[in-house]
Image (cartoon, grey):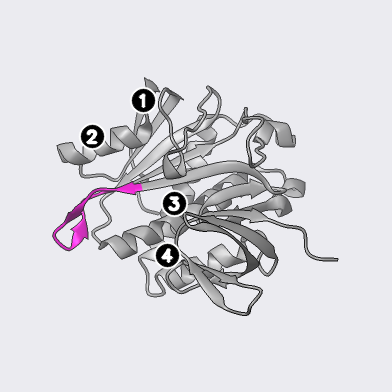
Amino acid sequence: MTALPPVRRFAEIDSTNEEARRLGEAGEPGPLWIVAEVQTAGRGRRGRSWVSPTGNFMGTLFLRPHCGPRQAGELSFVAAVAVHDAVESLLPPHLRPGLKLKWPNDLLHDKAKLAGILLESSGVAGAEVAWVAIGMGVNLAHHPEGLEYPATSLAAMGAGTVTPDEALEALSRSFDSWLTIWRGVQGFAAIREAWLKRAQGLGDPVTVRLSDGTYDGTFEGLAPDGTLQLRMPSGELRLVSAGDVFFRAPAG
């Protein structure tokens, strides 16, 4: 087994992804975990704020993946599968079937958001990205209320008490395993297959909110590059590279 990355800990920080950015610009070689008890400026996808109360897991895996921007984008799906499997290992068996992934990289339990992932990278340095920060927030003890999309936590699910350190250990081992697969012969194809096996709502009706409007269709799958395949009522297959997905009840 390879040695797991070292951990840099903070009692309070603006954002673990921001610290990763600072380290990247300062020449940190990585890989490295950055974790915090409290974030004062945590954020989610598309600039949304991320509530970060003490007792939840807040951390970032800092990497120098030595790959181009397209491959770096694949790490969003690597992260989703790794977080899924890490959290699954922390759950009692009867709660595990409800754990699913929502495109592109939210972790759900019974359709309520349990964890979020935010991947950020540097500008391109030559043909490669200089570094990648994979930020993660896992609701262990608390979850926000009154959001557009429902949320939950391990505590609310009845999974017992899981500490941030226990979550970190599970995440670190899961990432080690899935990063090895991603770097292997099958590469992203193996990650895509694993993601689809864990997907919420595959083949079901969804609403996708894009920058140019909202569209109803059927979640058909993932293209080879991870793009969402949305089958429109007209029969057209629309490829979605960025958007928000909402599940709808099947007709009838």
Q: Tell me which numbered mark, 4 or 2, is placed earlier along the sequence.
A: 2
Q: Residue furthest top?
A: 11
Disc 1 to disc 4, how far (Cα)? 32 Å
Residue 177 can be seen, yes or no: no
- Look at mark 4 in the image and give the residue it sits on: 181
Q: Tell me which numbered mark, 3 or 1, is placed earlier along the sequence.
A: 1
Q: Quadrant of the C terminus?
A: bottom right
Q: Nearer the viewer, residue 42 or 137?
A: 42
Q: Which mark is residue 14?
A: 1
**Residue ID at (64%, 67%):** 217
**Residue ID at (47%, 54%):** 211
- What's the amino acid at mark 3? Phe
The image shows residue 192, relative to residue 178, as above or below, that is below
- Look at mark 3 in the image and give the residue it sits on: 175
- What's the amino acid at mark 4? Ile
- What's the amino acid at mark 2? Arg
Judged from the image, the secondary structure of the residue bearing numbered disc 1 is: loop
- Look at mark 2 in the image and give the residue it sits on: 22
Q: Do the residues labelled 3 and 1 touch (CB within 8 Å)?
A: no
Q: Tell me which numbered mark, 3 or 2, is placed earlier along the sequence.
A: 2
The residue mark sitting in front, 3 or 2, is 2
Judged from the image, the secondary structure of the residue bearing numbered disc 2 is: helix
Q: Nearer the viewer, residue 104 or 250?
A: 250
Q: Tell me which numbered mark, 1 or 2, is placed earlier along the sequence.
A: 1
Q: Nearer the viewer, residue 150 or 95?
A: 150
- What's the amino acid at mark 1? Asp
Question: What are the residue bounds of the magenta stretch?
Answer: 120-132
